[in-house]
Image (tube, grey):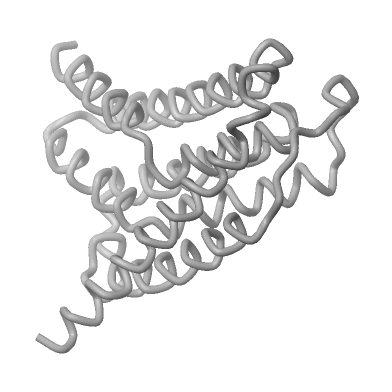
Amino acid sequence: MEQFAAVAVAHFLALLIPGVDFFLIVRTALTHGWRNATGACLGIAIANGVFIAGAFVGVALISNPVVLDTIQMAGGIFLIFIGIAFLRSNPVIAPDRGTGVKSRTWLRNFGLGLASGLLNPKNAMFYVSLAAAVSTATPLSLVLYGAWMFAVVLVWDVFVAVVLGSRHSLGYLQRILPWISRFAGVFLVLFGGSMVIGLVLKFLG
């Protein structure tokens, strides 16, 4: 029980730190509504689930330096691309907030969320480190840990999407949405650029 509590707390604290996935959810919720943003939330959660499963079953490939370097390069390029798209866009809050989810938009956001999660090497490294800390746990415990973390990622991301994409939030966020989009774009470009530059310097060194 103490080990589970430690794992749960460490994992949740990591979720509270704003990162690439957070900014993607925020912008998606504000521009497309929280229902469409659940696509990105599910994609991010599944990506985390892939890394959780890989780390907990002891797949060495996930922690292989070559694999991590490949993920880092692809992830950096992806983040730069998304960041530039954010900077070039003119985001507005969707006026129709109460209708059903449009499948095309939802699926597109799902794909973005899945790519964002899978192409972030920090996700892989975090779960590999966490798996090493619970290496003595029983297989059943690892299954429970993994299921818990997947559920927490999904619930937390949906919570963020609902809070920021609700009608109550729109009046406060309408004016600052362009600034949020620009800030997210700059953050993603800088973050992705640092990943690519860091990898290039690693190869050159």
User: Given the current orientation, which residue lies at the most extreme front position?
Assistant: 175
Q: Is residue 61 left or right of residue 89?
A: left
Image quadrant in which you'd find residue 158: top right
Q: Is residue 78 above or below residue 53?
A: below
Please state the horizontal and vertical placement of residue 162, each as a whole percent of the image.
Answer: 63, 20
Foreground pick, 23 / 203: 23
Q: Quadrant of the N terminus?
A: top left
Residue at the image point whose x is 56% and y is 34% from the top = 26
Residue at the image point whose x is 35% and y is 58% from the top = 191
Please state the horizontal and vertical placement of residue 165, each as a whole percent of the image.
Answer: 67, 24
Please state the horizontal and vertical placement of residue 44, each as a whole percent of the image.
Answer: 52, 42
Foreground pick, 185 / 74: 185
Please state the horizontal and vertical placement of residue 113, each as a whole percent of the image.
Answer: 57, 47
Q: Quadrant of the C terminus?
A: bottom left
Q: Is residue 18 left or right of residue 90?
A: left
Foreground pick, 173 / 158: 173
Q: Is residue 194 left or right of residue 102?
A: left
Image quadrant in which you'd find residue 62: bottom left
Residue at the image point whose x is 17% and y is 30% from the top = 137
Q: Is residue 125 above or below residue 8?
A: below
Residue at the image point whose x is 47% and y is 37% from the top = 22
